[in-house]
Amino acid sequence: MVTADVSVRVGWPADAPGIAAVQLRCWRRRYDAAALPLPSEDGPTRTSAVEDGPGEGRLTVAGLSVTDLAEAWRASLSRPPEARHRALVALAHDTVVGFALTVPASDPDADPASDGEVVELTVDPERTRAGHGSRLLQACADTLEADGFTRAVCWVGTTDDTLRAFLTSAGWATDGATRELQEAAGTVVRQVRLHTALW
């Protein structure tokens, strides 16, 4: 998707530093240096900023660097787990200003052949309200549909009113599924699943 000097395309390994910079700025704003679970093997991987003790297996946003994250992103973009794991980047004048990840849905009630998932949709906090999120979301829908999925899902924190409002304004709706995730220091994050038809 291209309009003047803004576009969305598939992410390349060379985009890793830009994706990492956007991710770190968003994490710092969202988590305010709180501890986070280590990213999974399917995405950015472990860094050296691991705490010992009760929080073992956690990292702090304050301890992360763009270099660490970029290295993990480069590896992930070079060798995705399977063909339908996609990274998309939003660009403004060739600068990465946002990114999204689409994968086959893995929930117990999902059909991985027909249900795709948007597992991440992030826009640089300094670049919001410029249409990048909308372009990314449309590119996610187009990508999932091209990969043969007929439904898209996305998990949203129950307190993330901004993302939920954004998705519902684009025609997404809750499907009744909820879950709780254990995060740093025993924090429980409650999420609700939104979905939309792709055809």
Image (cartoon, rainbow, N blue to C red):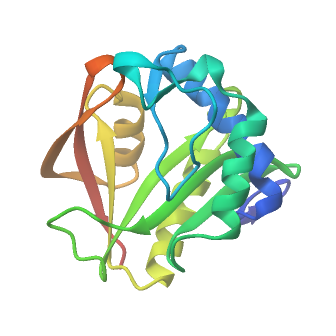
- In the rendered image, the residue lying farthest to the right is 93
Q: Which quadrant, please, contains the N terminus?
A: bottom right
Q: Nearer the viewer, residue 108 or 38?
A: 38
Percent coordinates x, y for residue 70 in the rendering: 74, 45
* Number of marks in the rendered image: 0
* In the image: residue 149, left or right of residue 124: left
Is 182 drawn above or below residue 5 in the view shown?
above
* In the image: residue 49, left or right of residue 162: right
Residue under the point 32% across and 66% down: 105
Percent coordinates x, y for residue 156 in the rendering: 32, 41
Q: Which of 62 and 29 is in front in this view?
A: 62
Is 104 drawn above or below residue 97 in the view shown?
below
Any part of residue 192 in sight: yes
Is 119 drawn above or below residue 37 in the view shown?
below
Residue under the point 65% across and 31% down: 24
- In the rendered image, the residue lying farthest to the left is 176
Q: In which quarter of the image is residue 161?
A: top left
Q: Quadrant of residue 171?
A: bottom left
- In the rendered image, the residue lying farthest to the front is 53
* In the image: residue 153, left or right of residue 86: left
Percent coordinates x, y for residue 7 in the rendering: 75, 59
Any part of residue 96 in sight: no
* In the image: residue 113, left or right of residue 20: left
Residue under the point 72% across and 38% down: 68
Q: Nearer the viewer, residue 20 or 177?
A: 20
Q: Which of 186 and 1 is in front in this view?
A: 186
Q: Which quadrant, please, contains the C terminus?
A: bottom left
